[in-house]
């Protein structure tokens, strides 16, 4: 193992992604260090989700390279669930399966193990994300928004992947639930040694759990660093983002 | 560093020392299960168990849980079990795993199978009653909506009605024509083939004419429409229900019956007789072609025989049934659509139910009409 492989979980170089004539990501480069929580901010429709979906291979790229855990990404779907777990914005739970079956799905598809162990692991994962064993037999339609996100997180973590992608994990949650969810991500990141890549608009999440924050504007990363540094950034869009009326109000109250 | 997980067991007196080595991760799960099972008996026999984790090179939740399970097995009967040599970066995970699976939910008591069956029977009986209620409610609601439109003709959703007519009427014509054409041709071929043996070929025309106009034309078209448009109605309304569009309509003070269901059912009631007419003509045309090329009966003779064999009554009997069948298909499709719950599976189930139920009801209705027309002598 060389040093670069040790240091970075995800390396993106000169990434170009576009749809038709429109270029969404324009020679974008980004490094995500191992074991950090990286928050990605950007304008709505500015390509945050596109970047995430390109890294996980859902959107084809036009140029550039992506390395995940030292391996170049490209057309490889085999074993994807063991490399990364993904928490989609709406949870994307399989609606015809119970909570338990949803969590067991990656285990069942990727490993050969006894039903007993699978049940125990599923309950263990559910308890780790703060749910209880009696929730296991519910269907996704019977869950609240916060519970859906927690189950989706349990499913994303089913195979203990080293990297976790979160697409707006706290959107649609009340501030208390969102705070709990942030704390949960922080705890899990420490216990499981995860690298977390989080797309978010939630300034509170950025301040409390993210080790570094990357700002995406005009198809590139215009600023990256701890929240403190980003607040001092001179880039006009970053200034507008963090020093707008809403942000100022929040930061003021947080102080 | 080992690439395969190992579990070394050493006895010293009554104490058992277990030393897992290598990667205890999900990727090696079958090896881990075998290992933990193989030492299970030893764990039960010994008085104190020590788990030495210093040799573990990689650990994830699954591996940690397998080890924790071994320690719980040892601890379950009052014996001592402890972990030693837990590396710093694994201790958080081990602590976390120690907390989980502590509360086993009470197992659901097995129920008497006879009672279970009886319960199912009761539920489906109540369900059948509910089905009838829902059908009648929808019929009543539609009736009220029609009265509302008659009192204020401007409240009719004309754009929607025309669009639905285009979709379920105009766009259905090619497939309806093709199917009924083939059915007419097949009936004629069978007639010529079997009637030829006793020299009654010319009666084939009577059979084709009466069968198509009275029964088959309308029945085939109704079944096609139930499968093609009824299922589309159920799926559309069902996904609107899932995405709360129907609730949004209601909160804006609009009645979903007026806005969504009346135009759809009305379009079906208008389109089905027209499609039946077109389908019947296509079937007669198919019969005529077979008569010429297979039965050696020219078009002139075929038309002359048809003229003798059928009367307007036959045509009326067929076409009169069409609007009623359309009403049944429309009501079943729309009410099943509104019964969709949150999940994708429920949408699929309701769509299937809608098609099966409407085809069944169309055939039952056809039978009732047959009795009715026979008794009034049509």
Image (cartoon, rainbow, N blue to C red):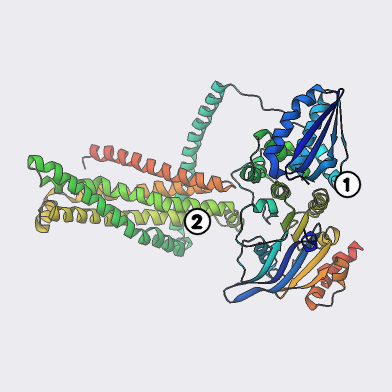
Disc 1: CA contacts within 10 A as few (<14), some (14-19) or many (>=20): few
Residues B85 and B95: in front is: B85
Residue B81 falls in image quadrant = top right
- For image coordinates 37% across by 50% down, the residue present is B326
Q: Is residue B222 left or right of residue B58?
A: left
Left or right, B306 with respect to B56, comes to left
Q: Position of residue B147 (x, y in %)?
A: 45, 53
- Relative image position of residue A213 (x, y in whole percent): 81, 65
Q: Nearer the viewer, residue B155 or A135?
A: A135
Which of these two is toward me, B322 or A31?
A31
Residue A180: x percent and y percent? 81, 50
- Mark 2 to mark 1: distance in Å? 63 Å
Task: Kindly indicate the quadrant of the structure image that contains residue B176.
Answer: bottom left
* Chain of the residue on which disc 1 is drawn: B
Q: Is residue B132 above or below residue B289?
A: above
Q: Are marks 2 and 1 on the same chain?
A: yes
Instruction: Identify the element where label 1 is drawn.
Output: helix
User: Residue lying farthest left?
Assistant: B199
Residue identified by numbered label 2: B260
Q: Nearer the viewer, residue B333 or A48?
A: A48
What residue sits right under mark 1 in the picture? B88
């Amino acid at each position: 193992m060389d040093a670069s492989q040790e240091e970075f979980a995800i390396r993106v170089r000169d990434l170009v992604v576009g749809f038709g004539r429109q270029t969404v990501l324009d020679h974008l480069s980004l490094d995500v260090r191992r074991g950090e929580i990286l928050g990605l901010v950007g304008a709505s429709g500015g390509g945050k989700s596109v970047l995430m979906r390109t890294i996980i291979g859902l959107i084809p790229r036009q140029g550039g390279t992506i390395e995940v855990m030292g391996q170049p990404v490209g057309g490889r779907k085999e074993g994807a669930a063991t490399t990364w777990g993904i928490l989609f914005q709406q949870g994307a739970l399989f609606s015809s399966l119970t909570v338990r079956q949803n969590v067991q799905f990656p285990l069942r598809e990727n490993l050969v193990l006894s039903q007993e162990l699978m049940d125990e692991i599923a309950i263990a994962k559910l308890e780790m994300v703060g749910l209880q064993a009696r929730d296991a037999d519910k269907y996704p339609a019977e869950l609240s928004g916060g519970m859906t996100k927690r189950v989706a997180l349990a499913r994303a973590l089913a195979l203990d992947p080293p990297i976790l992608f979160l697409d707006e994990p706290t959107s649609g949650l009340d501030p208390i639930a969102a705070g709990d969810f942030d704390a949960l991500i922080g705890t899990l990141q420490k216990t499981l040694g995860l690298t977390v890549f989080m797309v978010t608009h939630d300034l509170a999440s950025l301040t409390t759990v993210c080790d570094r924050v990357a700002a995406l504007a005009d198809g590139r990363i215009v600023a990256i660093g701890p929240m403190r540094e980003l607040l001092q950034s001179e880039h006009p869009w970053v200034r507008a983002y963090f020093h707008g009326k809403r942000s100022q109000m929040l930061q003021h109250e947080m102080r | 560093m080992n690439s395969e997980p190992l579990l070394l067991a050493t006895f010293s007196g009554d104490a058992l020392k277990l030393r897992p080595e290598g990667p205890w991760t999900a990727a090696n799960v079958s090896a881990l299960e075998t290992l933990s099972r193989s030492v299970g008996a030893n764990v039960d026999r010994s008085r104190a168990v020590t788990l030495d984790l210093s040799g573990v090179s990689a650990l994830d939740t699954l591996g940690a849980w397998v080890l924790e399970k071994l320690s719980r097995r040892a601890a379950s009967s009052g014996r001592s079990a402890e972990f030693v040599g837990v590396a710093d970066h694994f201790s958080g995970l081990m602590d976390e795993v120690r907390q989980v699976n502590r509360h086993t939910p009470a197992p659901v008591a097995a129920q008497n199978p006879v009672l279970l069956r009886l319960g199912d029977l009761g539920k489906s009986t109540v369900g059948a009653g509910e089905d009838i209620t829902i059908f009648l409610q929808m019929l009543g609601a539609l009736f009220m909506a029609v009265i509302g439109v008659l009192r204020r003709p401007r409240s009719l959703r004309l754009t929607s009605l025309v669009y639905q007519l285009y979709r379920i009427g105009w766009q259905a014509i090619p497939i309806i024509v093709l199917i009924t054409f083939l059915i007419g041709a097949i009936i004629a071929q069978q007639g010529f083939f079997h009637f030829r043996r006793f020299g009654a070929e010319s009666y084939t025309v009577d059979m084709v004419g009466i069968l198509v106009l009275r029964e088959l034309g309308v029945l085939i078209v109704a079944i096609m429409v139930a499968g093609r448009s009824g299922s589309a109605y159920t799926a559309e309304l069902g996904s609107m229900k899932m995405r709360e569009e129907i609730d949004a309509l209601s909160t804006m003070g609009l009645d979903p019956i007026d806005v969504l269901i009346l135009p759809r059912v009305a379009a079906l009631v208008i389109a089905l007789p027209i499609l039946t007419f077109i389908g019947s003509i296509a079937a007669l045309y198919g019969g005529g072609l077979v008569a010429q090329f297979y039965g050696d009966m020219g078009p002139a003779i075929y038309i002359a025989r048809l003229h003798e064999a059928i009367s307007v009554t036959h045509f009326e009997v067929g076409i009169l049934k069409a609007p009623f069948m359309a009403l049944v298909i429309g009501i079943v499709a729309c009410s099943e659509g509104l019964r969709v719950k949150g999940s994708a599976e429920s949408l699929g189930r309701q769509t299937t139910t809608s098609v099966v139920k409407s085809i069944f009801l169309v055939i039952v209705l056809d039978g009732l009409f047959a009795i009715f027309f026979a008794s009034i002598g049509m």
